[in-house]
Amino acid sequence: LVFFDETGNASARSANTVYQESTDGWVIFEVTFGTSAGSKNLQFLTDGSNPPTTQLINHTGNGGSPEYSHVCVPVKKNNYWKVVPGSGMVAISNLYFISLS
């Protein structure tokens, strides 16, 4: 379920793919860390380079019981960004870019 108002449109995106947005906006997604033992992580990278190298978020889960998070990240106009599921059982779902114009 994605909510947005008249400021923009929600456009579906995929993990492990570099995007460049032509407007300022927000990237929203859900992340689930699985129950297997061991550390799990994901990264959100964004900057003016292709591919982006600046880590804005490094989210870590430790396993045991499932862990769920909702993430909302601002992205500047013309910047590149990428969501990178790292090691372990990490699922990314409902990944969208919402334009502010």
Image: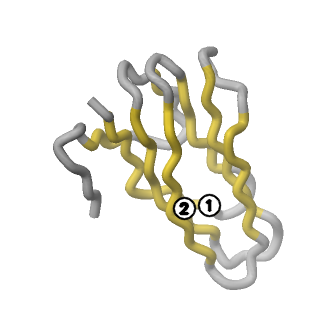
Most foreground residue, 89 or 42: 42
Identify the residue at the far right of this view.
38
Q: Which residue is mark 1?
A: 90
Residue 49 location, x and y as percent?
Answer: 63, 15
Most foreground residue, 19 or 73: 73
Q: Is residue 88 above or below residue 74?
A: below
Residue in the image at 67% along x and 84% along y: 65
Q: Which residue is mark 2?
A: 31
Q: Earlier in the sequence, mark 1 or mark 2?
A: 2
Count of marks overlaid on the render:
2
* Amino acid type shown at disc 1: Val
Most foreground residue, 83 or 87: 83
Q: Is residue 29 left or right of residue 48?
A: left
**Nearer to us: label 1 or label 2:** 2
CA separation, marks 1 and 2? 7 Å
Local packing at callout 2 (Cα closer than 10 Å; few below 14, some 14-19, many 20+) is many
| Cβ atoms under marks 1 and 2 closer than 8 Å | yes
* Amino acid type shown at disc 2: Val
